[in-house]
Amino acid sequence: MTSARSIIAKLSPLLACLGLLAVWQIAALWLDTESFPTASHALQTVPQILGDPEQLLNILDSIRRMVIGFSLAVLISIPLGLAMGRSARVSAFFNPLLMMIYPVPKAALMPVIMLWLGVGDASKTLVIFLGVSLPVIYHSFQGAKAVEEKMLWSGAAMGLNGLQRMVRIVLPAALPEILTGCRTGLVLALITMVTSEMIARQSGAGNILFNAMDMAQYDTVFAMIIIIGALGIVLDAAFDKLRWRLVKWAEPHQEILLGAS
Amino acid sequence: MSAQRLATALMGALPILFVLAVWQALCSFGYAPPSLLPPPGKVFLRLAQQLGNVGFLDDILATLIRLFAGFLVAVVLGVGIGLAAAVVPAINAVVRPLVQVLAPLPKVALYPALIILFGFDHASKITLVTLDALFPILLSTYYGASMVEQKLVWSALAAGTPRWQILFKVIAPAALPSILTGCRIGLVISCIVVFLAEMISSTDGLGHLLVGAARTFQTVDMFVPLITISLLGLTLNGLLYGLRKYLLRGFPEV
């Protein structure tokens, strides 16, 4: 019984995918226009794109930039966010500046940054870095602020110094919140990746997508949407697995019993 | 107390002033040619000039309309679906896998499809904003509502609250802090996305101004929309913070 249930639970995202594709297929058949290909048509185009070495290299380029930008951002943002959460001075110092930068669309900086660093990897990676770092800082900050004082006092009483308390008490206690931030960051990384390549039409997945759009190759447009979407889903699922391992203890326990149960 | 608050505000102003100073220094010592990095004074002067310009205000208005329309639809849908999924298992069973699939999807990639379906006008941009802002709001509503203590529900039931009222009298208020956090993230994302959508394809709005300026290498005009959207985001964030303070006035420190 439980195993059957868990199998259904595991398959449900797949079912949802199939359902969405089915809705797409029906909508496309019903609208029946040149510019909106059916799901099956778009799916058939996917292997064509992935099979073309040049396009594949483009997409791998995008992924590489995203991974570098994301990792750098996480490495720098978590310590900064934790420091802001534990020290009122640090947070008073950085908070207003960060709050000002947060709502600026980082990909919108792309035209400006391109003027300085060129259209190459450096500017795109920098933009992704900027896009990821703010949510991670913000959530690390919130997480570190919410750590129970008692635990820190206990740590201090046991002779941990400031840095040790940070690493052994604040970091683990804030980890669920930090990972929430990283997840938001991951989504933003994908958004910025696509848009930065859309603006600097030189290489990458966003470039293929918007070039196809301009040239009215609608099959390619929709196939690229499937590829980028699948990339997002796979990355998110991998991240969720990692999160599950790290912070199993902090998961919400049960659903509210209000309905028929 | 007020002296301390003043000190905090001064501390916060420091790095902003520092950035402005570095910016000015880069320009005045000739490290950056004005064609690449115009001096801050020039940019702010142009911003002040533009604020008196009707065309510029129209662009801001167009951006704001799209931003608010998209965000509000996202709030209504996100809170509604989130609460429903937390309370009704049948809805949860349908919504959960759909959200798992759709939430991590980079919605900007859908934008070409939205243009094809809804045209270049407001509709496609508003839909994109809604899609992007929806999931943070939906997820935090759902988590907030499913973390509500069972004891509260039992107490309310024992006190004679009808079942259908529990949702509005117990669960929604208890989930409010979480819902508002989600709204804040959703708002920031809306600001980002509306700007991007306008950059990709538009005839008006702040994003369009930026792209237009970038094409003609008018660096001063490139910075003006960037600073405007930053200030808009800051203002909206402040308003939301005020709303949060007002709505959560009975809650212990959040």
Image (cartoon, coloured by chain):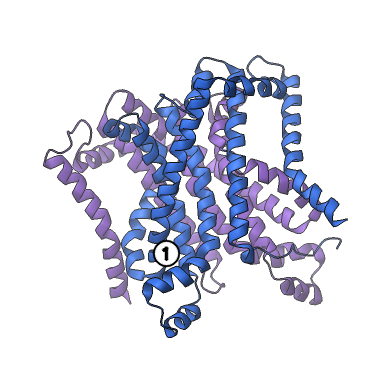
| Residue A35: percent from left, percent from top | 63, 17
Q: Is residue A80 above or below residue B204?
A: below
Image location of residue A86, percent across then percent down: 40, 70
Indicate whether A166 appears above or below B124. Answer: below
* Residue count near mark 1 (Cα–Cα under 10 Å), binned few <14, some 14–19, many ≥20: many
Q: Residue at 43% of width from left, 85% of height from top?
A: A157
Tally the numbered discs.
Answer: 1
Indicate the chain on which mark 1 is placed.
A
State left or right for residue A162 relative to residue A246. Answer: left
Which residue is found at the position 81% from the left and 47% from the top?
A: A8
Chain B shown in which color? purple
Q: Position of residue A12 (x, y in %)?
A: 76, 44
Q: Is residue A244 visible?
A: yes
Q: Is residue B205 left or right of residue B5?
A: right
Instruction: Find residue A37 and report its horizontal and vertical position in percent.
Output: 67, 19
The N terminus of chain A appears in which quarter of the rendering? Answer: bottom right
Q: Residue at x 51, y 39 (%)?
A: A190
Circle 1: residue type: Leu
Quarter where residue A41 is shown: top right
Quick check: B147 left or right of A73?
right
Residue bearing the label numbered 1: A82
Q: Nearer the viewer, residue B204 or A21?
A: A21
| Residue shown at 73% from the left, 53% from the top | B85
Q: Closer to the camera, B133 or B65?
A: B133
Residue at the farthest bottom position: A157
- Quadrant location of the C terminus of chain A? bottom right
SS for callout 1: helix
Q: Residue A141 lies in what quarter of the image?
A: bottom left
Q: Which chain is blue?
A: A
Taking depth in this image into account, of A78 and B80 the one nearest to the observer is A78
Q: Residue furthest right?
A: A1
In this rendering, does residue A221 appear at all? Answer: no
